[in-house]
Image (spheres, coloured by chain):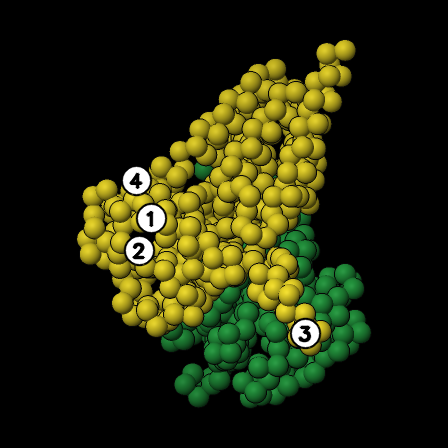
Amino acid sequence: MNEQELVEYFRTQMGKDPDMASAVAAIRTLLEFLKRDQGETLFGLRESLTSATDCLTGVDSSVAVSSAGELFLRFISLTSLEHQDLSQCKKVMEERGELFLQKISMSRAKVAKLCHTFIKDGAKILTHSYSRVVLRVLEKAAAEKKRFSVYVTESQPDAAGEQMAAALRKLDVPVTVVLDAAVGAVVEKVDLVIVGAEGVVESGGIINKIGTYQMAVCSKAHNKLFYVVAESFKFVRLYPLNQQDVPDKFKYKADTLRSSQSLSEEHPVIDYTPPSLITLLFTDLGVLTPSAVSDELIKLYL
Amino acid sequence: MPGADKNTDLSERIEAFLADLKRGGTGAGPLRGSAETARETTALLRRITAQARWSSAGDLMEIIRKEGRRMTAAQPSETTVGNMVRRVLKIIREEYARSRGSSEETDQQESLHKLLTSGGLSEENFRQHFPTLKANVIEAINELLTELEGTTYNIAMQALEHIHSNEVIMTIGRSRTVEDFLKDAARKRKFHVIVAECAPFCQGHKMATSLSQAEIETTVIPDAAIFAVMSRVNKVIIGTQTVLANGGLRAVNGTHTLALAAKHHSTPLIVCAPMFKLSPQFPNGDDTFHKFVSPHEVLPFTEGEILSKVNVYCPVFDYVPPELITLFISNIGGNAPSYIYRLMSELYHPEDHEL
């Protein structure tokens, strides 16, 4: 499977189901790549997978795709430890890969099931930009006949917040779109803040659309609950200490990275929110405090 | 018929326990401490295991879950009952896994690692029958009971590490655990204790009497004086009713005030709580677990004139967020509040969080 086919397959996966997380599409693509791979050695397989992941991050530079790639590589290593023979190993990998995809397709439902009980009747919720997981949680809460209202930030530069507002209006949830700059003014009115995450880092902090950090700081200043909902495959092996530590390859869109002359003139699309500002994380592995996240990552990678 | 007698005997005991629970938690402090409740619950669960009819681990877990639900419904604020039920359920799972021969550790918890490496959508349904399972489970429950009996002693043993000579310690209300903790330290060290009386039940008075009988210099202060006195205090040591899953506390009312005053003065806040008080609940609402009792203690009914014009409340518990707590001292040692999630995963299985 060469680069072009890879990119096309990835694009088709993303297009087929707009509700699917980009990380899931990446894993599907890598699984397909694995199936079609002709290599004879494990080392060769790992090499080609690494270059395939690089290729995919060239299409979609988000943290989620990169973490999916690393997860898949780890998956290969773990499986290969058990079976020495490559062809048998590949068969096992394909089976487990399918199973893994099945399990993570249920992860959003698990998160929604955990989180909706934390939304009280009459709650006012603030959220940021368009997150499919948050939408799922709010859907579940609405289905449980809870009455709540939502404030969504517009989230420039792509106005993703409007998409979220439209989806919420379809659920008959009263929603107000606010300017990104209005977060500080609005936060005193709300009861809790729920955001999604593109990546969950080792310290328990999150990487999410630009404007999330602002929201977190404001909600901490007003002592509001700040909840993060994310599936477990978004856990990534990064440990940024501040905004600058987040690698440039995640901060900007893939085309910007390729085409621009000097990155200092570009606007970053993500920011980092430290764990001290987060109250709880809702994942398909359960409700976690930020300190529990590193435990999960250690269990997997070490 | 002996079989039928055993059954009715068992259900009688369960009913008696439920009635006791319903009565036990009415105002004026608990009629029984949490330690006794924990012990009685565990003894009752052991009896159920021994006497009820079950053929596989799954059946036993269903029976225990059902009884557990009834018990927690009888007295929702007494969380030790639910905690013990969950401990026993975890014991059953472990013994089952051990009987099957599979390594119990990795199979239990959900984790990323498990997601990647498991071979099949294993639905563990606990249907296999093992003849030795009953004996193993009962033995494990006996170990749990021994552990429960040793908790106060284990906590008190750590007292000398934390209390030094000539220190001023503050506490609130009455906690048997803290009482034993302080009395143990008093055998070797001289220190001063300030007890906040904890209105309206004023359990602090009993605490002060008991401590002074052990020859500890004690002072009783009203709750309003907590902030004023805090600047003279070296450490705050408190007990609690429940430790929540995020590391927060559900403690006697007035504890949040005490915690905030301690934070303001950067005084360490130490919580002495045995492991059976650790509950997998999260504080997901500020009205979902407040328990109120008769406001007679706050404003007696004799003040009839103004009663129609005011609302009087008498809450029993307070929520203390984990940021205000420095250290948890439990029967297994000292831990930071951020470590509570780890202790929880060792004690309870995630599927048992909701009984």
Describe the element under mark 3 as helix, strand or loop.
helix
Q: Earlier in the sequence, mark 2 or mark 4?
A: 4
Which mark identifies residue B211? 1
Figure colour of chain B: yellow
Chain label for disc 1:
B
Closer to the camera: disc 3 or disc 2?
3
Q: CA distance from mark 2 to mark 1?
A: 7 Å
Q: CA distance from mark 3 to mark 2?
A: 39 Å
The three-letter code of the residue at mark 3 reads Glu
Horizontal arrangement in the rendering, residue A294 relative to residue B287 (left or right): left
Chain label for disc 3:
B
Q: CA distance from mark 2 to mark 4?
A: 21 Å
Whether labels 3 and 1 share one chain: yes
The quarter of the picture where residue A64 lies is: bottom right
The three-letter code of the residue at mark 2 reads Thr
Chain drawn in green: A
- Image quarter hosting the C terminus of chain B: top right
Question: Can you identify the residue that label 3 sits on?
Answer: B305
Q: Earlier in the sequence, mark 2 or mark 1?
A: 1
Task: Tell me if label 2 and label 1 are in contact, CB under 8 Å.
Answer: yes
Is residue A25 depicted above or below A221 in this figure? above
Q: Earlier in the sequence, mark 3 or mark 2?
A: 2
Q: How many other residues sit within 10 Å of disc 2, few (<14), some (14-19) or many (≥20)? A: many
Question: Can you identify the residue that label 2 sits on?
Answer: B218
The three-letter code of the residue at mark 4 reads Met
Question: Can you identify the residue that label 4 sits on?
Answer: B157
Q: How many other residues sit within 10 Å of disc 1, few (<14), some (14-19) or many (≥20)? A: many
Kindly identify the residue that appears in the image at 73 percent across and 17 percent down. Answer: B5
